[in-house]
Each structure stands twice: as structure tokens, then as C-alpha cells.
Amino acid sequence: MTRPGDDLLLAWIVGALEPGRALELEEEAARDPSLHDRVARLRTTLAAATAATAATAAPSWRLPPPGMAANLSGGWAPAMVMSGALRPGDRFVVKLAPPDAIKRAVVVLYRAAGAAWSVVFPGGPDELVTLEELPLEPDGARRRLELMAGPDAGVQRWAVALPLVSAPIDWGLEPVARWRLLKRAVASGDVPVMTVAVPVGA
Amino acid sequence: MHTSYHPRPDTPPEEEPLRWAEFIDHHQRRRGAAKSAAAALSSGDPRPALALLSGWRFAGAEQLAAPLLAALSGGAPRYAETAPLSHTEGDPDLAEYLHRQRLAVAGGGELADCLEALAFLGGEVERRERASWRAQRYLPDPEADAEIGGLWAAWFSGNPWGIRDAWEALLLPAISEVFSAVMEARSVPREVRRAAIEDAREGFFYLMLGGEESTPGWRELAVRTLECAPEGPLDGVTPHPRPGTWDLVARCAVRRGHLETSAAALWPDRPGAEARARALRRTLADDPGAAEAMLDLHAALRVLDRWSTGAHDPAGDWRVVIQNRGRSRGRIRAALTSDPASIQEPLLRLDALAARTRAAVKRMAWAWARQQLGRGLTFDALAGVTPPCQQPPEGLAPLDDDERAALESWVMLVVFKGRLGHLRRWSRTGGTGDTDSTWGRLLKDDLPAALRDPGGGRNASYHRVRTALCEDLEALLEAQLPALQALLALPGGKGLRGRFEGLLMDGWSPTVPFPKSGFPTFHSNIADALESLSRDWEAP
């Protein structure tokens, strides 16, 4: 007789089991009272783990996962043919298919493994670049944005958002406040955005 | 997870346990009924057997039950006569447990035993797979129900961005809770767990939106919510699809692995898959209850097939039932997502919509979290939780018998090389998320040329084989389970290659290169694969 694994018991605890499987466990618990003790222990452990995780969750930019995008398509590749993985400081290229003919600024965000998103470009009004100022790829359709891998080994995430050039940015504000409107516009799907995951070796 | 050995569906666990005298009476009655049914069936009268099998929905229609009855009458597996063992006296639970074991394990015996074992499984299907769903109580909350109804309407209208905050506020707590539980079950380090939960919270809305190649998750969630309807997981869903959806289901079913075999058994006089698909579509469209009956028939035929291979254990029988029903339900769910308009009205009409939606989101999140763990928590190119119901690409024929045999050998080779995870990811998404060279060689060098799309040359494409795997991989692995277990049981050390060959060479496709070395590693890779399959198949 196989004892139910922790996987199944935890699914039961959080209500993720289909009713038939839940019924199986109820019956098993009726036969084997020690199951109640295991469930109680797991419930306590899970509550502690959930509380610890929730308490430290970083505020999110609510960006799409890598490989997905909101109103924007594209991809990434190393800037040159390489024999191994990218290393910190290596260049890579994000290829962006313009979503429309509207003049849009390029905003780049970066997130190291386990860290929060932050805007890394532009750092000031004189750094503003529009999408149409980026060079064209050989396919003549996509724009080429060259970036440099950050210092952190692991899977780095990079995001590119394309707000309207006419959208105001108050450079006098602190960075967090400065990008609040862009953050909201990204979350509401009003700004095209895409994310890529870039593995970087040590 | 093993099956329950409580005697009957009409004896729910919350009732007083059976006393010994009641158990003996129950036991004698069911033995008598099984013997009478077997005798009648042998003399051409199926009615008592159908009455005995009434837990299975197909038993209500003699025509549907015909393939099973034919298999039973034509030299079906036989089981030994059994009576409660003397030392179990006074302990109905133990007596029932041992009775099931003996029914299953005995090599030669009577049709009556076979019918009794099937009757037990049918009762369990009705009790666990239908009645337990109908017994669920979802508490109405007028305010929350109205709110979620408005949010669902926004998804159906195609303009969900405006409801993102409200949608996430309502459902992200469930996503976090479920991801946390899955991570706890796998002992994922806390830092990784925190990042994964954050990614899940961030990715949930995009999962709902869907990617270029994946079904929008909101449609799957809508179908899962409808599965929580008071009628049950299929009966609540099947009245709504339009003919085109049933067409998709039928075309999927008649060309896919074991479902293809069941369809051929049901319509042996229909020439080819197209004709069977038409018959199946008509049956499903004419009678919304037919889907449950078809699923039951398929599951029962799979159990008979399992018995014919010499596998005899009650837990394995039940696993076959729920896996085949689960996969078939997944196919119907996937087909329904292609026509969301057909489920809008019945979904919005459900009472306790908020509670039903939360229940559905938890089940979907569990599957999503496990899928993400299998992909290394990359949240990369979200592929949807239920695989889409795929048709072979235009102009590419389904695999024939030789090609299917070659695919089976190749999948075995993939398991030997420890790349089952890669195969699963690749079959669903077309990528593996890495540049693993072993996987690359398996695909470029070891996959038989006949399984590649025609005309690819150096830039081979694999739509045809991926379509087959997307639908059939789990069934194929299930069929390979006994062989993998036998390989794992082989003693290691010198001569292991010869022992592998002894077990495999008869059925190995000549188009797939049999490995020359690495057998000790294969041994441990098989152990890992079996552990992974066992864990996944225990999933809710």
C-alpha cells in the first residue's frame, strides 16, 4: 500500500486536488489517522514558508515573462558568433519589430537573478533614443538594440518598453517616482514591451 | 496513490464500517451476481453483465458496450475463484483488500472474476470521477460572484487589460499559495522559491493572455471553471460545444494512440480514421452524455489491454483508468478552448462563480507550477497548461505502424540518455530552453529520417512527430512502463549491455540505432525517469 506523498498532501491542503483525488485522501485519512499528523505538520511548514516568501516579495513591474510580449515581437542573439555562453560585459543584440509607425522612445530595464527590475537606460534626457534611430537588421524590418551583459552570472532578464516619445518624463524626480507612470502604462498594456532571458556565465 | 478498497460506492466512508456479517453477505451477493452475469454472457445474454457494470456509463447502451463484451467473451483474462481468507474474519477492510489482490493476481480463473473486477472499477469511476464532483459545494457570495462575472465578461469581450488589477487581486493569492505548496513539496530553496512565486505572479496575467503559439490561458480556465458545474466535470461541459468543436475532438481521438484502437473497436466496420471520426462526431454531437460513456469505454478497454499483458494489481488498474480518463478530458478541454463563445453563457450562468473560479484556478495553477518546475522555472515562452488539440499539419500524414514503432524505440533511447525532460518540453513547445548537445544528437542523428518532415534536408523540421508526441507521449510512456521497470530490475555489472539487448532487441526498430555503450548510466537514467513519471502521474 503506497503512502500518499507530500506532493499530494500539499495539493490537498491548498485545495488543488480534483474532487476524486481529494476523496481518496479523505478515505486514506479515515483508515490511517497518522495521516492527520503529517497533514498538520505540512500545513504548519507551508504557512511559515508562504509567510516568509510573501513578506519579502519585491514590488513588481508586472512585465511579461521571457519569450512573451505585449504588443511587441522580437528576440535576442549574441552580438557576434561565440563558442560558449555570454560572459559579463559581452555584447548581445535585442531585435525589435516596430509595433506601429508612431514615434516611440526606447526604455531598457534589467533584472539580475533574484533581484528587482530597474530602468538602466535612459539615465537622463540627453540619453533618450527613439526606436527609429536604432539601426535596421539585415532583414530590413527589425531594429537592432545592442546591449552589454550585466555583471551578474546567471539568467539575466532584460526588458524593452516603447513608450510614446511625447509621454512626459520628469527627470527631476527620483528614479522610482520618475518611472511610476511608465510602470502603470506597462501594467495596463498601453506600452509595447518585451522581455528576454539571457544566460550569462561566470 | 492506491485505490480505496472500501467495498462499494453505495457504502460511503462517512457511514459506519461494515460489520463482518454484512461484509460476508455483500461478498456472497456480488460473487453470485458475477457468476450469474458470466453464465448469461457466455450463453449470449449480456444484460446481467451490463447491469453489473452499471457504474460505467457505456453499460447503459449495449451497442457502446459491444467491444468490451466481445473482448470479455473472446478469451479475456481469467481470474481465480476467491473467498474471504479465514484469518481476515472480523476485518472487512482487510478481507476486501486481499480479495481485490487475489482477483487481480490470480493467473487463471473465471469470467465472473473478470466481470467483478470491472464492476468494482466502474463503481469507483462513478463514485470518484463523477459523484465526488457533483457532491462539491461552492458557497455563493453575491458580491464576489457579480464581480467575477464582470471580469469573465471582459475576457470574453476580448478586452481584458482594463480588468487586470481586479483579476489579479482576486486570483493571485491562490496562485501564490499553490506555487508555494508545490515548491514546498519539492524542497525548493527559499531564495529560488521567492523568485519563482514573483515570476508566477507577474506571469499569470500573460498566461491568461496566451502567446503566439499557445492557447490563451483564460479559455482553459473558463473550461476548468465550467467543469466545476453541478452536473460534473464532463456532463457540465459537453452540452455546449458546437459541431465544429466535436469535429476537432473526433479527429483528435481517432488518430491518437490508444484512442485510435478504442475507436476501431467501436466501429470496426468503418473504413479508416475519417469514417470513424464522422461516426464519433455524430455520436458526441447527438448525445451530450455520450462523451462520458466513450471515456468509460476507452478506460475499460485499456484495463482489459493491461490485463492481457499480464499486469495484475488493483492500484495499476485504477491508475490506467484515471490516466486515460484524465488525458481524454484534457483533449476535450483543449478542443473547447477553440470556441470560447460556446461556453460564455453557461459559464456566466453558474452560481457561486467566484468559488468555482477559485477552485479551477488552483487546479490549473498546480499543473502550471509543476510544468514550470519541469522547465527549470524559466517561465520562458509560456506554453499553456493543457496542450492544444493538434491536427497533423496540412499535407503531413499521421504516423503509420512502422513509424510509430520507430518512435517508440526512439523515445526509449531518449529515456536511456536521460533526456525525458527535454523530450517533454520539445514536444510541447518545439524547444528545450537550452543547447544540450546530447539532445541535439538524439534529434539530428538518432531520430529516424522517416519521422522528420519530408523535404527538410539540412534544416529538418519535425511538425509531424511533434504532433504525434504532443498527443501521445504520456500514453506511449505508460505503455513502456513495464519494459522500463524490467530494465531497471536487471542486475548491473558486467554484461549489462547483453541483458538490455536480451530484453529489447525483439521489439527494437531497426531504424533507431541501438546504443553500444553507457548502459550503467542508462540504468540510473531509467530510475530517474521512472521516479519522474511516478511523481507526475500522481498529480491531481
Image (spheres, rainbow, N blue to C red):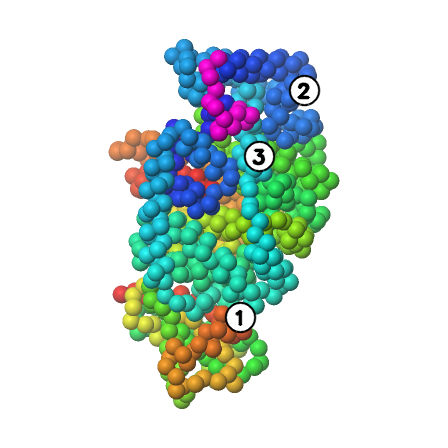
> Residue A62 sits in which quadrant?
bottom left
- Neighbours of disc 1 within 10 Å: few (<14), some (14-19), many (20+): some
Q: Residues within 10 Å of mark 2 (few under 14, many from 20)?
A: some
In terms of sequence position, does the residue under pointer 2 or pointer 3 come before the other?
Answer: 2
* Residue B81 sits above or below residue B476 on the image: above
Residues B143 and B476: in front is: B143
Residue B17 shown in magenta: yes
Residue A97 visible to the viewer: no
- Which residue is located at x 34 percent, y 38 percent? A38
Q: Kindly identify the amino acid type of the residue bearing the numbered disc 1.
A: Gly
Instruction: Find out whether the residues at labels 3 and 1 contact each other: C-beta distance under 8 Å.
Output: no
Mark identifier at residue B47: 2
Q: Chain of mark 1?
A: A
Q: Amino acid at mark 2?
A: Arg
**What is the number of callouts on the image?**
3
- Residue depicted at 47% across the width and 77% down the height: A181
Tell me the quarter of the image containing the N terminus of chain B: top left
Mark 3: which secondary structure? Answer: helix
Q: Which residue is mark 3?
A: B131
- Tell me residue B322's x, y (percent): 52, 36
Query: Which residue is found at the position 53% from the left and 70% from the top?
Result: A189
Q: Residue furthest toward the top?
A: B86
The local secondary structure at tag 2 comes to helix
Give a yes or no on whether discs 3 and 1 share a subunit. no
Residue B362 visible in rendering: yes
Q: Are marks 1 and 2 in contact (CB under 8 Å)?
A: no
> In the drawing, does residue B322 fall left or right of residue A58?
right
Range of residues picked out in magenta: B8-21
Front residue (pair B479, B5): B5
User: Disc 3 marks which amino acid?
Assistant: Ala
